[in-house]
């Protein structure tokens, strides 16, 4: 596999799901899942997101907020689809029937929204509120408010890293991380100008600068800088201000990772390094069957042959897409 110096942004994003991969291209997304019988099931849908068509939604620093919410909603929806192949057959309960009747058949969407909101509340509690209260124990020995803010940020990053590391010991999460690696390998393969076949994808990196893990690190890093300037004494006000600033943090972080995905500037690469290092925990090396699933998801929403022709200047022969025996 010859190394290409040129890289080209593809616009594809995705995430790992239970025994599969979701890939999104513009308003179209596909979830590919390896079913228990070994077959690959691909579900193709459109997802336009919240407040679709509103121009302000695309404004810099504003778009990151909506992109984050959309990612959570779509991610939960994709996970539910993948999990449906591995759930035991259960009869519909009276509660399920009543909820479907009340919501006019949209019970799953309602539950997905509720779970997403609860997940956000839990994340704020663990990664925003908890670090503040832990750092407050240092106020007796450390009188400098700026230093306390730095300690709080360091605690926040430590909690995040320990969380990522801790869940990696769970069997299902380890497999999820391997599918995460397959997702990254496929996108790296294309953006470096290589043909999308299993053997070539396997030789590509499992780390990518536009990863959600890197986004989360930027959120933590940017929050340290913004929270540094909160100079109020009341603990309740401090916590509320931190929560209120999270949309601002998400908006700034999105612009940074968006720039990182489109640039090879040395400074940008340096800023991306910590997130890439954490990705060594959140991605693992996939096997060829996992890569096949990721390729199926991409091919359902993205014409990668046209992309290579338009951006790297060569045609892909049909036979070259087949995996070598």
Image (cartoon, helix red, strand yellow):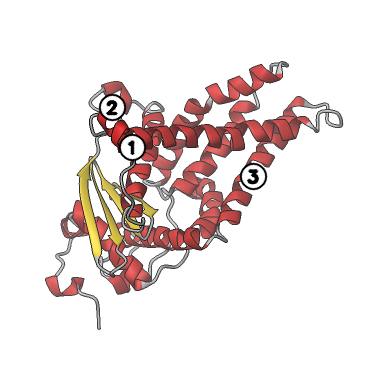
Identify the secondary structure beneath mark 1.
Answer: helix
Mark 2–mark 1 CB contact (< 8 Å) = no
Q: Nearer the viewer, residue 172 or 75?
A: 172
> Residue 159 has which mark?
3
What is the spatial separation of the Cα atoms under label 2 and label 1, in whole angstroms? Answer: 12 Å
Identify the secondary structure beneath mark 3.
Answer: helix
Disc 3: CA contacts within 10 A as few (<14), some (14-19) or many (>=20): some
> At which x and y percent is residue 167?
56, 55
Residue 157 visible, this angle: yes
Residue behind mark 1: 94
What is the spatial separation of the Cα atoms under label 3 and label 2, in whole angstroms? Answer: 40 Å
Residue behind mark 2: 102
Disc 2: CA contacts within 10 A as few (<14), some (14-19) or many (>=20): few
In this rendering, position of residue 183 left or right of residue 135: left
Q: Nearer the viewer, mark 3 or mark 2?
A: 2
Disc 1: CA contacts within 10 A as few (<14), some (14-19) or many (>=20): few
Depicted 113 relative to depicted 200: above or below: above
In this rendering, position of residue 206 left or right of residue 43: right
> At which x and y percent is residue 284?
47, 64
Which of the 4 image quarters holds residue 148?
top right
Identify the residue at image location x=36%, y=57%.
88
In this rendering, position of residue 166 left or right of residue 118: right
């Amino acid at each position: 596999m010859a190394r290409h110096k040129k890289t080209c942004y593809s616009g594809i994003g995705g995430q790992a799901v239970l025994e599969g991969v979701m890939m999104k291209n513009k308003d179209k997304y596909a979830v590919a899942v390896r079913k228990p019988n070994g077959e690959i099931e691909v579900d193709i849908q459109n997802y336009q997101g919240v407040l679709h068509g509103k121009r302000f939604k695309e404004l810099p620093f504003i778009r990151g907020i909506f992109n984050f919410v959309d990612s959570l909603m779509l991610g939960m929806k994709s996970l539910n689809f993948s999990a449906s192949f591995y759930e035991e057959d259960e009869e519909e309960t009276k509660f399920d029937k009543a909820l479907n009747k009340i919501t006019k058949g949209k019970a799953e969407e309602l539950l997905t929204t509720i779970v997403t909101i609860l997940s956000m509340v839990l994340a704020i509690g663990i990664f925003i509120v908890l670090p503040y209260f832990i750092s407050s124990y240092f106020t007796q020995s450390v009188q400098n408010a700026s230093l306390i803010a730095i300690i709080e940020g360091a605690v926040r990053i430590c909690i995040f890293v320990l969380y990522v590391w801790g869940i990696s010991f769970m069997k299902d999460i380890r497999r999820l991380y391997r599918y995460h690696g397959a997702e990254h390998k496929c996108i790296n393969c294309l953006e470096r100008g290589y043909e999308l076949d299993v053997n070539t994808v396997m030789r590509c990196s499992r780390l990518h600068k536009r990863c959600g893990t890197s986004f989360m690190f930027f959120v933590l890093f940017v929050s340290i800088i913004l929270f540094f300037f909160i100079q109020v004494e009341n603990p309740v006000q401090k916590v509320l201000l931190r929560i209120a600033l999270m949309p601002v943090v998400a908006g700034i972080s999105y612009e940074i990772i968006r720039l990182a995905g489109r640039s090879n500037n040395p400074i940008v690469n340096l800023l991306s390094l910590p997130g890439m290092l954490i990705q060594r925990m959140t991605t693992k090396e996939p096997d060829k069957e996992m890569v096949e699933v990721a390729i199926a998801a991409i091919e359902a929403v993205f014409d990668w042959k046209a992309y290579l022709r338009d951006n790297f200047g060569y045609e892909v022969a049909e036979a070259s897409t087949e995996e070598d025996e």
